[in-house]
Image (cartoon, rainbow, N blue to C red):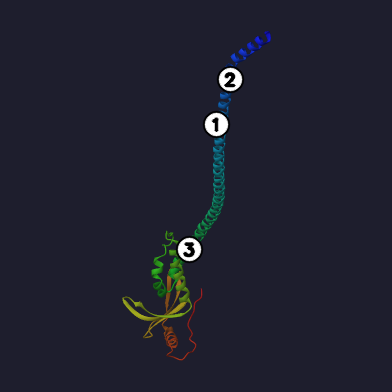
Amino acid sequence: MKLCKFTGIIAVVALMAAPTSFSNTANQMETASETLREWVETERRIARERAAWESQRLSVEHLIEVQMQELEALQERIAASEEDIGAAERERGELTERDQFLRTSDAAVAERIGGAEQALQRLRPRLPPPLQEEARSLYNALPEPGQSSTRAIAQRIQPVMGILTLIQRFNQVVTIVDEFREFEAGNPVQTQTIYFGLAAAYYVDSAGRHAGHGRPGASGWEWTEQPEMAPAVQSFITIYRGTEQARYINLPVEIR
């Protein structure tokens, strides 16, 4: 009887304790479920963040690659620019040297042309009168004796070369011209004058009354009358023009 009573007490105690145990278990299961949901959500978030980070990483890597390509292209352009600058500097240096050389050359040429201009001015009175008349316009382009020209070198060379060409041509041939000379005051007489280049000249009139010879002097041509020369000068003119048979003609020559 005592054993049955004790067993009954245990059963009552067990029955009285059962609701509390079931309640704790339910709470634990709910807590575990909530924890599981939170863990799953956390994993999802981690997965999303990982995917987003991976996407951002790829974007950043692509951006870095593009930037590196642009940097390389920029460095190439800088290098090319430096080469161009170097070439430009070298070319500039060469042009500067050439400009300096040309300036020096121009100065030397200008000095030589100035000397030639003054020499031609000093020579002018010694030129035969027909040659002086032919070169008049060219001489007008030269600076006056003792003065310098402000004209360009090319403009100064032209009259100098022109005068020299006329002088050279005149000095290579015999020239016969008609000129008027005054032997009596106010009575000009037409003569024919023979110029042997720049060295000497002989004149005679058609009547054979006046004749003489000339030579260049410091202030102009100097003429000496020698009427006795008239036949010889007339003969030379007719022989030169082909109307008389060629023969030797003696004419005086004065050499200084």
Q: Residue furthest top?
A: 2
130 or 166, which is in the foreground?
A: 166
Position of 137 relative to 227 (above/below): above
Which disc is residue 22 wearing? 2
In primary-sequence order, the first of circles 3 and 1 is 1
- From the viewer's perspective, is the residue at label 3 or at label 1 nearer? 1
Q: Quadrant of residue 121?
A: bottom left
| Residue, disc 1 | 41
Residue drawn at x 40%, y 75% is 130
Residue 236: image location, x then y, percent: 45, 86
Q: Secondary structure at mark 1?
A: helix
Residue 158: image location, x then y, percent: 44, 67
Q: Amino acid at mark 3?
A: Ile
Residue drawn at x 54%, y 36% is 48
Residue 253: image location, x then y, percent: 49, 79
The number of numbered discs placed on residues in the rendered structure image is: 3
- From the viewer's perspective, is the residue at label 2 or at label 3 nearer? 2
3D distance between C-alphas at marks 3 and 1 = 103 Å
Q: Secondary structure at mark 3?
A: helix
3D distance between C-alphas at marks 2 and 3 = 131 Å
In primary-sequence order, the first of circles 1 and 2 is 2
| Residue, disc 3 | 113
How crowded is the residue under tag 2: few (<14 C-alpha within 10 Å), some, or many (20+)? few
